[in-house]
Image: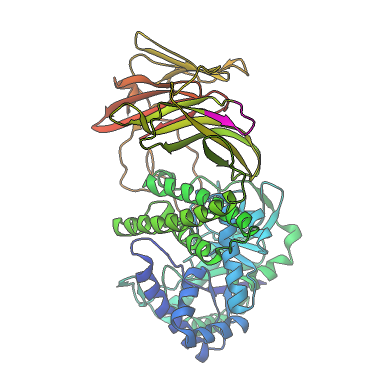
Amino acid sequence: GWKVFVVPHWHFDALWQLPFEEYFDITARNLMDLLEFLEVEPEYKFCIDQTVYVEEFLRRYPELGEKLIDAVRAGRIELVCSGYTQPDPNLPSGEFLVRNNFMYQKFVKEAFGVKAKCGWYLDTYGQSAQLPQIFKKSGIDYFVFWRGVPQEPPSEFLWEGIDGTRILTHRMPLGYGAAYLPTGERRYSFFINVTHEGEAVRFLDDLAERMKPRASTDNLLFPNGDDFTPPQRHMPEVVRRWRRLREDLQVKIATPSEFFEAVEEHEKELPVLRGEFNPIFRGTYSTRIKIKQTNRRLENLYLTAEKFSAVASLFGLPYPERDLEEALKIILLNQFHDAINGEVTDEVYEGMMVDYCKAEGICREVLEDALGAIVDEVDTQGEGIPIVVFNPLSWSRTDVVEVELAFGDAGVRGTLLRDTQGREVPFQLTEAGRNPDGTLNRVVLAFEAEDVPALGYRTYFAVPTDGTSEGKFETSIRTEAEGGRYRIENRFYSITVDPVSKAITSIYDKEAKREVLRTEKYLGNVLFDESDHGSVCHINGNIDGHQTAIPIKDLPDPDLADNTMKCVPYGHISEGGPVRASISTLGNLNKIRFRQSIIIYDKVKRIDFRTD
């Protein structure tokens, strides 16, 4: 017969309408209420997800923390893995989704002596196809989510990820508050309608009938909780009454793992679903864009600081574990799904940016200490000012480097750049500061550092001279500016822009011998200004954001929507030297001032597009 697993829980928003501190206070009171209720109701169980608030609770309330630890070890509370915080599964890098789970498992092992078995992404905006692999490699056997399926699937299935990894999955067909009884308990700052026990049983009866057609087995998971909800103290009595009235149902209050253990008996019969469960809430991908840009910059900065700190530790520099963990926790907190998506109030947004500054300061200090310790071991003997270029990636790399050099009043009129073999290296002078007598006091040089080893370095020397600052170097860079028509090219690409709008009319790939763009309807690098639809979740019209993924709509009609093809911005070849060339434009779109640059390089096969 049918088995019903009533799973009490709550959903904690780390950052949303209020900052973390205020939400923590609500949840701390709920935790106190939970621990008290567990002592008087032996049938009651609960599940808790993110460790960001659990860690803080143990720190602030050590005596109650002991009760929480005992309840977890006794199986009365299950710790389910949302990570340090429940992140957005699409915007953070895969490495930081891994770190999020790692921080979770590390904490619950050290604090509780257990390992989480169940993943718990009940409020995230779509699901990345990488998650089965990430969760399985995090020691997780089961996965629960709500949003993002392309159609209505069965509620239990095996989800197969990109690499073929499969994880036993439950998709909440009616949301994570489906079995939260409509009572008079406080939710946020208001009360919802009061009912009595009989109505609660009828509510659960109806819920069971709605869930049965969606189930893959004869097991039903009833999520009994909602945002910041305290334990429903009357739920055990409601379950007991329902059990007496429905002898055809086996009903109990349980943890998620108990539900999955029952489903596992039928695992061979379950359907297999593959790939992404996206897109959903697409408007959030571009809302408060500075959050996204800062997040990616700090992800890269953190990993670079971590890698070179590990290298520097081989030379005796103490590894800065605490500093890096502090920075990591800030980054992970701001990757909470409502936060990184930008679906937060101004107060929360401003607090996030302050915290980002703190994390960046920590990472930069750690990185500077590490690189300083490594440079002390590098042979920098040679003529001129030594420049040590580091590559933080795990493969050899050729890329453009910019470096600022200060000469003071040494009478320098030019400079050469050489490698350790004495060979002259092409460079481009991008900035120059001069003394009253015309000599250089500072310069910014751009050059291509070739084949810098993985997690390694190359050394160059800037040699001051009394001659010109730039020599004549062979280069594939070519520029053309004639009659308002601008073109830049290198050994890889030829790029042409429209004389009027400065949008791209052609990108020709020389190696593939083909035109990259189709310009029958749209030119390249065009900005569109679309109307607001009243919610950061929605773009180009309303979408069903609660459950199903919606196909991406066509791009807006260029004849109807405001866009930069209708503008006449100022444009010019802003750079053209042996290292790189660029076309820059400056204009206005609906009183929004914009600046765009298209940049190519001599030996780097990449086109950079920058928009400010």
Indicate the colouring scheme.
rainbow
Task: Determine if the magenta segment contains residue 420.
Answer: yes
Q: Position of residue 409 (x, y in %)?
A: 35, 35
Quadrant housing residue 419: top right
Task: Determine if the magenta segment contains residue 429.
Answer: no
Residue at the left extreme? Answer: 591
Placement of the C terminus among the 4 image quadrants: top left
Magenta stretch in the rendered image: 417-423
Observer able to see residue 253: no
Residue at the right extreme? Answer: 268
* Left or right for 112, reference 24: right
Would you place residue 246 above or below residue 500 in this image?
Answer: below
Looking at the image, which is closer to me, 119 or 476? 476
Placement of the N terminus among the 4 image quadrants: bottom right
Observer able to see residue 71: yes
Would you place residue 389 above or below residue 40 in this image?
Answer: above
Q: Which residue does the image show at 56% across and 82% down from the upper left?
A: 69
Q: Which residue does the image show at 71% across and 52% down from the upper left?
A: 165
Q: Position of residue 84 (x, y in %)?
A: 52, 65
Would you place residue 255 above or below residue 70 in this image?
Answer: above
Q: Which residue does the image show at 51% across and 53% down from the upper left?
A: 367
* Left or right for 549, reference 275: left
Q: Position of residue 520 (x, y in %)?
A: 45, 16
Q: Position of residue 270 (x, y in %)?
A: 71, 57
Total numbered badges shown on the rendered structure: 0
Would you place residue 472 above or below residue 303 in this image?
Answer: above
Quadrant housing residue 602: top right
Residue at the top extreme? Answer: 483
